[in-house]
Amino acid sequence: MSPAIRVAGFLAALAAVFGLALGAGRTFGPAAEPAVAAHEAHAVGNEGASLENAPAAGAALPGGLMTAQDGYSLTLADSETQPGRDIRVAFTIEGPDGLPVTAYEVEHEQRLHLIAVRRDFTGFQHVHPQLSPHGKWSTTLDLTAGQWRLFADFTPAGAAALTLGADLAVAGDYQPATPAGESRTSHIDGYRVTLDGDLAAGGEARLTLSVSRGGEAVTDLQPYLGAYGHLVALREGDLAYLHVHPDGAPGDGTTQPGPDVVFHAAVPSAGTYHLFLDFRHQGVVRTAAFTVSATGTNARASDGSGTSTDDGHSPH
């Protein structure tokens, strides 16, 4: 074979390899993300998640799976802390310019919502940190030993809404709870909250949560974050954070203050989901917890558990 032919063959092979690498880059995303992806894969693996939770190529990634997205990043002041009540937690959101973000849009009556959940779903808190003039957020949480996931749900001024997540390790003897079974009824402080509606993988579901107390329907719920309830949905395994939208709003002339609170939820895959409903009644915010499946059919369960608080914190 002549040298000219050998050179031409080498160049053709080089072009083919380059084209394959370019195609892979387009399929799997920008090269800046591998460290985050590897970290998340490790976290999911520790919790025994299956590959069925992975989004299909080209599918939108659920919120909370990455610490950085669209040029914004979530950085905890400390990634490890001690257990206890009123433990201080601080963090910053850095923008595309590398500086802490100080301007946010107000969504659901707050500039930022912080969700803290222990990875075995036995602890859940929804709080609203304070922002310093220099862009540092701070709040306190009630934390037990174990691995926690913190979700910052926010909208930077002039940008799209984002949910970023970061892990917080809490020292101490950690005994993960047994995974919860299906539960569509939650009992909390004498309240009974039931969930009706089936999650459908790849589609939107209408979920109705009904609140009663002492066998009587509660018809005087108080607004909380611009609605008669606020619902958070987390996928078991990787803790993907899903946005859930309430149906109607207080004072719109049609939405009643209970006993039913309606939400619309879209889940990307089959699997188990943990739902947490915050609702306010007689000046106290309480949290009802549910576990449901998105498999096409759902077995109904008759009992469950919830948590309560007067300041948005939940005991563990």
Image (cartoon, rainbow, N blue to C red):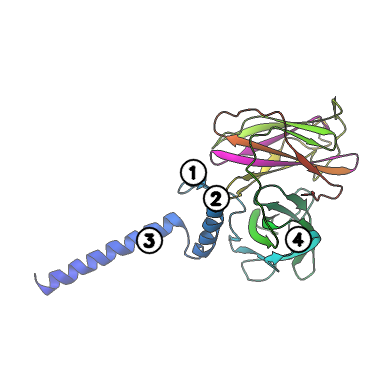
- Label 2 Cα crowd, 10 Å radius (few <14 / some 14-19 / many 20+): some
- Label 1 Cα crowd, 10 Å radius (few <14 / some 14-19 / many 20+): few
Q: Are marks 1 and 2 in contact (CB under 8 Å)?
A: no
Q: Residue furthest left?
A: 1
Left or right: 120 with respect to 33? right
Of 3 and 194, nearer the camera is 194
- Label 3 Cα crowd, 10 Å radius (few <14 / some 14-19 / many 20+): few
Task: Tell me: residue 113, above or below residue 227.
Answer: below
Look at the image and give the residue range highlighted in magenta.
257-283
- Residue 22, label in figure: 3
Residue type at numbered disc 2 = Leu
Q: Residue 1 location in percent, x, y?
A: 8, 69
- Measured Cα–Cα span from mark 4 to mark 3: 47 Å
Q: Earlier in the sequence, mark 4 or mark 2?
A: 2
Q: Quadrant of residue 81?
A: bottom right
Q: Which residue is mark 1?
A: 52
